Image (cartoon, helix red, strand yellow):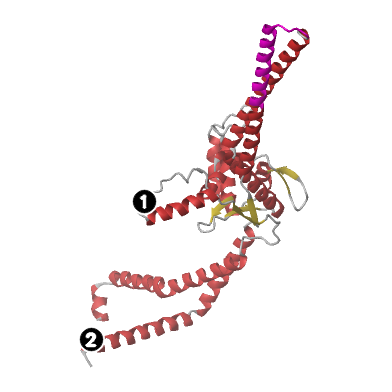
């Protein structure tokens, strides 16, 4: 056998011996390990039962896929195969599903949820979302303790003066409104599957019924926002077409009335000048009717366009009241604290305690006189 292989075998034997020694050392200190693990388990139970229960409501919706874009994408693929460029004319929609999370977390969208009325499951009390977060949302005891310095500093500072008739302004929020926006953004999360474009909205609240109501409201508000954006151009075209139609209608009625009044006043007159005026008024009434008819058709087309551009959403998973709390996971917290206590105790026994003992031995050896050191030698 070569020298390298012998060295590797010796190193492997030394490692095995070291592991056996470590295991025997831990076994000798098993009572301490058990004590630390029990203490960690007790701390884990305290932490688990101190965290308020949170209930999660998840809603999944599939937005409508624009066929025009799909067709444009197919033509673009064929064009790229042929070595041509199809351009980017198909991507006319600025708010696509990947931007839905940004819409949900935006300040105007979040502040619109402040006044949403919710009902608690325990006592059936009705209140707004902002009132529920202020009055009914609890925090663990250590959060209150850690927040005391900030509260004391806030008492020393001058409080923000809010006018009596203050109204919500998304451009300039107050300190309380800004904190409320941050709190809601932490409790409302939206994500999009890049492959299927399915939008998932998760709402975490300390009441299952409040969580379900708020999740359903967020979905409906998001649908309204996207629908308003998609149909904005079509609705403006419809309003303009209706305006033209109303003007054409008024002009037609006026022209028709002028023609009827002229016939009533000049009935039985056979002058050529009278016939000429009658023909002119008749032509004006006919032209006004034709214009009125055309604008009426444009209104019908605009109405169809609004209906065509209105998106349709398929609710894959509707909002339901959660039966079990999503957090805290008490079993995982208990196991985690017990494991951390065991690892900390093992590290103390194997590394920290021997290091402290070696330093104490070194310091005591330095304190002895030279004669005692010679006798020890």
Q: Position of residue 23 (x, y in %)?
A: 44, 82
Above or below, 208 against 132 in this view is below
Identify the residue shown where x is 62% and y is 45%: 223
**Label for residue 4?**
2
Looking at this rendering, what residue extends furthest in the bottom direction? 1
From the image, which quarter does the N terminus lie in?
bottom left
The stretch in magenta equals 268-292
Q: Name the residue under label 1.
A: 84
Q: What number of labels is visible?
A: 2
Question: Is residue 360 part of the magenta span, yes or no?
Answer: no
Q: Position of residue 330 (x, y in %)?
A: 62, 65
Q: Main secondary structure of the magenta part?
A: helix
Is residue 112 among what the camera can see? no
Q: Where is residue 300 in the image (x, y as percent from the top left)?
A: 66, 35
**Eye-nearest disc, 1 or 2:** 1
In the rendered image, which quarter is residue 13 located in?
bottom left
* Disc 2 residue crowd, few under 14, some 14–19, many 20+, Cα 10 Å: few
In the rendered image, which quarter is residue 314 located in?
bottom right
């Amino acid at each position: 056998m070569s020298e390298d292989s012998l060295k590797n075998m010796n190193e492997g034997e030394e490692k095995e011996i070291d592991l056996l020694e470590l295991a025997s050392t831990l076994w000798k200190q098993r009572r301490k390990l058990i004590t630390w693990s029990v203490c960690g388990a007790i701390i884990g139970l305290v932490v688990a039962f101190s965290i308020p229960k949170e209930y999660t409501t998840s809603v999944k919706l599939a937005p409508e896929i624009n066929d025009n874009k799909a067709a444009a994408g197919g033509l673009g693929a064929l064009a790229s195969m042929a070595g041509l460029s199809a351009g980017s004319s198909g991507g006319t929609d600025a708010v696509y599903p990947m931007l839905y999370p940004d819409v949900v977390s935006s300040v105007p969208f979040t502040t619109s949820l402040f006044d949403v009325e919710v009902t608690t499951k325990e006592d059936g009390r009705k209140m707004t979302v902002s009132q529920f977060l202020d009055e009914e949302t609890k925090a663990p005891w250590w959060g209150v303790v850690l927040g005391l310095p900030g509260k004391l500093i806030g008492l020393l500072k001058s409080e923000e003066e809010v006018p009596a008739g203050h109204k919500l302004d998304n451009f300039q929020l107050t300190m309380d409104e800004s904190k409320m926006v941050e709190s809601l953004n932490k409790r409302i999360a939206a994500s999009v599957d890049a492959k299927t474009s399915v939008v998932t909205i998760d709402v975490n609240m300390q009441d299952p019924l409040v969580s379900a109501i708020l999740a359903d409201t967020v979905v409906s508000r998001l649908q309204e926002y996207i629908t308003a954006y998609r149909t904005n151009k079509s609705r403006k075209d419809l309003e303009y077409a209706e305006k033209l139609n109303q003007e054409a209608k008024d002009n037609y009625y006026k022209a028709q009335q002028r023609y009827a009044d002229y016939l009533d006043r000049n009935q039985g007159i056979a002058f050529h000048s009278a016939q000429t005026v009658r023909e002119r008024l008749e032509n004006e009434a006919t032209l006004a009717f034709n214009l009125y008819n055309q604008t009426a058709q444009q209104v019908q087309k605009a109405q169809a366009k609004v209906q065509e551009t209105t998106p349709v959403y398929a609710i894959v998973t509707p909002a339901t009241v959660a039966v079990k709390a999503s957090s805290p996971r008490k079993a995982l917290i208990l196991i985690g604290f017990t494991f951390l206590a065991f690892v900390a105790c093992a590290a103390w026994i194997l590394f920290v305690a021997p290091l402290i003992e070696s330093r104490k031995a070194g310091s005591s050896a330095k304190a002895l006189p030279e004669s005692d050191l010679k006798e020890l030698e």
